[in-house]
Image: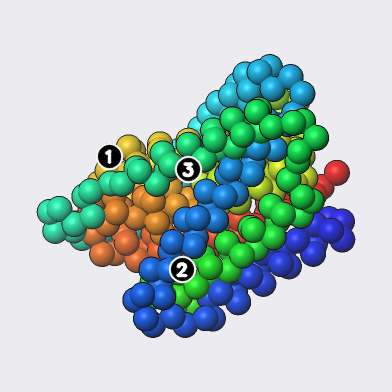
Amino acid sequence: MDSQSFVMLLWLLGALFAGFFVHVTRARTLVQVNRAINALVYGLLLLIGFSLAKQDALGAQLAEIGGRAALLFACVIGVNLPVMMAFDYWRPWRRPIRAAQGAGSKIRMTGTLLQMASILAGLALGAITPQAWRAPDGLITCVLVVLIALVGVQLRASGVRLRQVFLHRRSLELTAVFSASALLGGLLFALISGTHWALGMALASGFGWYSLSSVVLSTTHGPLWSGVAFLNDMGREFFALFVIPFLMRRTPSAAVGTGGATTMDFTLPVIQHSGGAEATLLAISFGFLVSILSPMLLVFFASWK
């Protein structure tokens, strides 16, 4: 890892933990934090789309991005999900108590659709502006650091305590199984596609956190691979929404793990509804651990030349 990547990793982890130790008690302040996070996510995706539009032969690259993202998704999920299901069979976990009917049953996709619209808006903006107009160096990284810090504040405000997170045995085991199998999927992608093994593992390290993976890959490998990371992690989010209810009855750990880093936000309602209180606690703990691990693995593998 070069010095620049190491500094970036320190900034990301420092921002996450600094935010976590900021205790917000006022509901109004928390609402403002949540709004700021949403605004920063949209802004980041807009910048990524803008940068992608500035690349030469964009049309050909979009076709390449889609093809590579589809292969990456198939490799990562194709290894990740069966391994987690096997883990559930070999080390059974008592079935989580089912939540009351209707709890968390309303799944909101509006935010994700707006995020997809943001990257499309960035593409359009980049296409209509002069080719010389580019985002200032370091702007994306600065916005990302602020976003990570606010995510830390959000985690603390949600009631997550470090003791709950790090002493939850099932969560620790699931995090290890999930991370190792996802990385194996990334390695498989690298072998099939002929890319560098470290790049394949970096692409697999987003764990569904597309606003992070796309920014890191944009910084280290350019907009093409940033787009691949974005589509792969976005695909995990939608895939998890549809398979969690079916997996929860027989393989609850696999159901939770499928969502990756999204288990604390986007996929949490469906986990709560189909799995109940115990599955919800596992999801929060697992999502927190994965959110710490993802930036470390992303920066480490993405900076491996």
Residue placed under numbered mark 1 in the picture: 246
Q: Is 238 situated above or below 66?
A: below
Residue drawn at the location 29% of the way across and 64% of the way down:
278
Q: CA distance from mark 3 to mark 2?
A: 18 Å
Q: Earlier in the sequence, mark 1 or mark 2?
A: 2
Could you classify mark 1 by the number of other residues whose Cα lies within 10 Å: few (under 14), some (14-19), or many (20 or more)?
Answer: few
In terms of secondary structure, where does tag 3 sit? helix
The front one of 16 and 239 is: 16
Q: Are marks 1 and 2 in contact (CB under 8 Å)?
A: no
| Dot 2 amino acid type | Val
In this rendering, the label closer to the viewer, 1 or 3: 3
| Dot 3 amino acid type | Gln
Q: Position of residue 142 (x, y in %)?
A: 69, 60
Q: Position of residue 146 (x, y in %)?
A: 61, 65
In this rendering, the label closer to the viewer, 1 or 2: 2
Q: Earlier in the sequence, mark 1 or mark 3?
A: 3
| Left or right placement of residue 5 versus residue 112 in this view | right
Question: Which disc, if any, is residue 33?
Answer: 2
| Dot 1 amino acid type | Phe
Q: CA distance from mark 1 to mark 3?
A: 27 Å
In which quarter of the view is residue 282 placed? bottom left
Number of labelled discs? 3
Residue placed under numbered mark 3 in the picture: 115
Q: Position of residue 288 (x, y in %)?
A: 49, 64
